[in-house]
Amino acid sequence: MLRRIASYLKGYERYAIGSPLLVMVETACELTIPLLMAQIIDHGIYEEDMTAIWKYGGLMVLVALVATVMGGLAARCAAYAAQGLGANLRRAEFEKISAFSFADIDRFSSSSLITRMTNDVTNIQNVCIMCLRVLIRAASMLVASVTLTLLISPKLALVVCVILPVMAIGLGLLMKLCMPLFEKMQKALDHLNETVQENLIAVRVVKSYVREDHEREKFKEANDGFTTAGLRAVLRVVAMQPVMMICMAAATVLVLYNGGNMVLGGELDIAYLQTVIGYIMQILMSVMFVGMALLQYTRAQASTHRVFEVIDAQSAITDGDAEKLPAPRGRVEFRDVSFRYQTEGAGEDVLRHIDLDIAPGEFVAIVGGTGTGKSSLVNLIPRFYDTSSGQVLVDGLDVRDYPLDGLRSRIGMVLQNNVLFSGTIRENLLWGREDASEEELVQAAKDAQAYDFIMSFPDGFDTYLEQGGVNVSGGQKQRLCIARAMVRRPAVLILDDSTSAVDSATEGHIRESFRENLKDTTVIIIAQRISSVQYADKIVVLDEGTVADIGSHDELMANSEIYREIYDSQQEGGGKDE
């Protein structure tokens, strides 16, 4: 795992290598200071030699300055390395997520993906800094201090040999206990983020239904869950401190007792006893720091697993390998297509044995009750999902054989949830086609009946849209999304209930523009209002995931009981448009 993490330091290797080297120099300087102090006591104070005091005192100051400079440079290098590692991990995650199908995103959930790109990567960055500085420093200090203690007094060094295994065993047990707790803590954070995200996205609904208290209770439950999970992990970590302090106190008492006897017996100089005590304290402090670093590493292991779970995920949808693509004409075929969502707890097929042939340039409408699979059907065309069985063909070629870019570039899609991005209206429309001219943008806006309201803004096409297009109305947002799709001049244009917030007159103008300016484009529209689809060349009636009837409005009124029921219910409910 460490080797794999290190591979994401690309571009920042010099910082990752430089920081430990600088830390080692800093450590060597700090370990030299007790030796210089012993020289001051032996040759300066005992012999009353001021020259020796100034000499070794000056060296101590110089060594301390070098240690300070090395420490500062090491911290700088570690920060660069950690930030670079985080940037590379986030980039790798985002690139993978960008290639995810809808099914992949359903599997992870958007809130969990956000946590994995932010909090989990931050945990890994923190451990990177700790390893490059604290762990290297503590390990270097530990090895050097043990070595110097052995050189000065092997007898006192035995104390360390007794204490260190006790501390190591305690740390090992603690790490084993903490690993599953940290994993639960990250999952609780996923749930907390999901609750906050859902509340912020639906804030208007929450306020309109006066459900603030309900949402506060939901947040409290998620927040308390995260707090409880965090406390369980942190309290285990806190348990390390008294164990370490007891070990340090025991080691100090043993060294003072044995060292004092050695001084009294003439076996050891008091100056070197003081030096040994300093080194043993360094050893014990180093073990504590190593323990802290390893516990942080344990938490980062949980985060690392979650991050690489995303990076290593095999997308359910991959590029096809067709070398030669058919000309974009707009023919769409469904051949015995069945489909079910591959999510936990998924039930029966949403679509069953669908056979449907849509000719190039046809205006096709899809109607049916809620939950009959209308959106699922059209989502199979651009391969947002793959069929469970059967084939979907575009221009005679199975969509699974298309390179994804090649397939989706010939399809314009206006989804049920109209999404606009922060930026100008012009920038949003250019999502349809980046090289579209000003004339094409204007024409698409006119075709979508958006031109007039765009020009009513002081900045026209350069009007800035807030995130999600919150500063335009629902109907305006729908028309901008339709214009964006029309800019593409696609072979197939799919509108999934995309005119629900538009009045009938405006919808009629949009439909007319399709016939006039998209004559060669196959238009597939999902709509709830019969008045929106009765002029279609072909109307497909879905019922419980199957094609119940196909025909024109008049044919279906004469032969389809389901279609008549939908039509009559809208007439009785005031659904008829004046």
Image: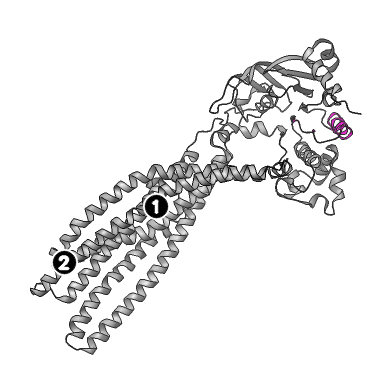
Measured from the top left, where is residue 206 in percent x and y? Answer: 69, 42
Q: Is residue 520 above or below residue 428?
A: above
The reply, left or right, for residue 377 in relation to residue 305 is: right
Measured from the top left, where is residue 157 in percent x and y? Answer: 17, 62
Measured from the top left, where is residue 93 in percent x and y? Answer: 52, 44
Of residue 192 and residue 115, the one placed in the foreground of this image is 192
Name the element at disc 1. Answer: helix
What numbered label is drawn on residue 351? none
Residue 217: quarter of image: top right
**At 36% from the left edge and 65% from the top edge, which residue is drawn?**
22
Q: Looking at the image, can residue 204 be seen?
A: yes
Residue type beneath disc 2: Leu
Residue at the far left in the pictured view: 265
Q: Is residue 395 magenta?
A: no
Residue at the far right in the pictured view: 578
Q: Looking at the image, can residue 139 be seen?
A: no
Total number of numbered discs in the rendering: 2
**At 66% from the left edge and 26% from the top edge, which residue is drawn?**
376
Span shown in magenta: 494-518
Which residue does the numbered mark 2 point to in the structure image?
151
Residue type beneath disc 1: Gln
Q: Nearer the viewer, mark 2 or mark 1?
A: 1
**At 42% from the left edge and 67% from the top edge, which residue is drawn?**
73
**At 29% from the left edge and 57% from the top edge, which residue is drawn?**
244
Residue 151: quarter of image: bottom left
Residue 378: quarter of image: top right
Dot 2 crowding, Cα within 10 Å, few <14, some 14–19, many 20+: few
Q: Is residue 498 above or below residue 2?
A: above
Q: Where is the C terminus found, in terms of image quarters? A: top right
Measured from the top left, where is residue 510 in percent x and y? Answer: 85, 33
